[in-house]
Amino acid sequence: MNTNETTLEKKFSRYQVLVIVLLALTLFTVMLDFMVMSPLGDILMKSLSLKPKQFGFAVSAYAFSAGISGLLTAGFADRFDRKKLLLFFYIGFIIGTLFCGLSHNYFMLLSARIVTGLFGGVMGSIAMAIMADIFPLHQRGRAMGFMQMAFGASQVLGIPIGRYIADHWSWQWTFLLIVGLAAIVWVIIMIKLRPVTQHLHLKTEKSPLEHLWHTFINPHYRNGFLLTCLLSLGGFMMMPWGSAFAVHNLKVSPNQLLSLFVLSGTAAMIVMPLIGKLSDKFDKVKIFTIAAISMMVIIVIYTNLSPVPFYVVVIMNILMMTAIFSRVVPANAITSVLPKMQDRGAFMSISASLQQIAGGIAAAVGGLIVVQKTDTSPLEHYNTLGYVIVVIIIFNIIQLTRVSNMIKAQKHEDKL
């Protein structure tokens, strides 16, 4: 093995491992808060007498408020210690989730989701900025792969427990469980995470508004923003209706639904580090393209399914989850290369905002497309969502290739 290969395979330091664990735990709680809206969807619609359109708005309210919050904070994101930003927005997220757990009607839930989105929607961008500051590019794919395990863990551990609590007590207690866990993680971050201030040494004379505007209008950055938006559309459009489709269309029982989330989440946890390692070794565009094509085929088949044996539902969900994250990891690794260090916080905040806004639009549109005549009848037009997502994924492939070529051209110019 030559020197370059040794460098690429360099192990994480003990502190880097700690950072990965802390950021993964943070994202675990934030993702869990969003993810439980899918398995609790059927319970929420029945408990609060919600129509699919109302439930879609409850999901999109989080996304829209997260998008607005990200834009408002983007100009300031590179002017503070990233650790302090993380702690500030995390405590706001915890308070918002607490309000979700105290909600007893649609208005209270909708308001609580807006508050949670205002703070929680920025968490991912702050975590990504911290990760990009601490991990060099040749380690970034693996670091992102481990961080993305938080998504799988939220299904393997959080969603089944949350669903069990909702089934045996009430759905409100699911959110209260997240509050308790997040509070513990917040304290650990405050004690263990070092200040992240390298970017503060790169002075800028721009005001926060100018910094936001100059980051937004940068042509290279705009291509990254578009890619991020396209990536979020499919998930937001399809995910909120996952449990309702499984229960009412595929005739999955509540106990089987728990097993479904555990098995698909476990698959995601296993796949993420592997995909991260592969994206550090091989061409990220090829990995993304293979995963995207696979995802298109799987979605078309799955959204057109009628009642089938449970093992078929499990296999389809595992394949779909694997394909989804095999796209996310290389795409995030590529876009993380775009911003300069002094622009990284603003870039990540704007990117997260546009992602959330695009996702909010997708969830709202999904709520308008999907129809459920009664609270126990099958969902109609779910396959229409599948066809729309296929078109979006095609644009994903085109835009990712464009961004990758742009980065390669920029590197070539820098060498000249």
Image: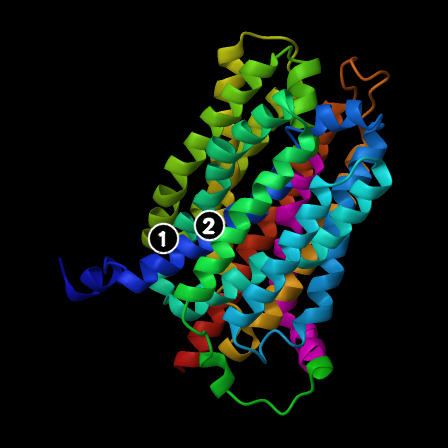
Q: Quadrant of residue 362?
A: top right
For the residue marked with disc 2, what is the amino acid? Leu
| Rendered location of residue 301, percent (x, y) | 60, 20
Question: Mark number for residue 25?
Answer: 2
Which residue sits at x=80%, y=35%?
104
Residue 288 position in % (x across, y down): 48, 45
Please say whether residue 399 is one of the residues in the magenta stretch. Answer: no
Looking at the rendering, the stretch of residues picked out in magenta corresponds to 211-238
> Are discs 2 and 1 less than 8 Å apart at CB?
no
Q: Percent from the top left, x then y, of residue 231?
A: 61, 48
Assign a secondary structure to mark 2.
Answer: helix
Residue 382: quarter of image: top right
Quarter that holds the N terminus: bottom left
User: Which one is in front, 297 or 59?
Assistant: 59
For disc 1, the marked residue is 142
From the viewer's perspective, tell me whether residue 300 is left or right of residue 110: left
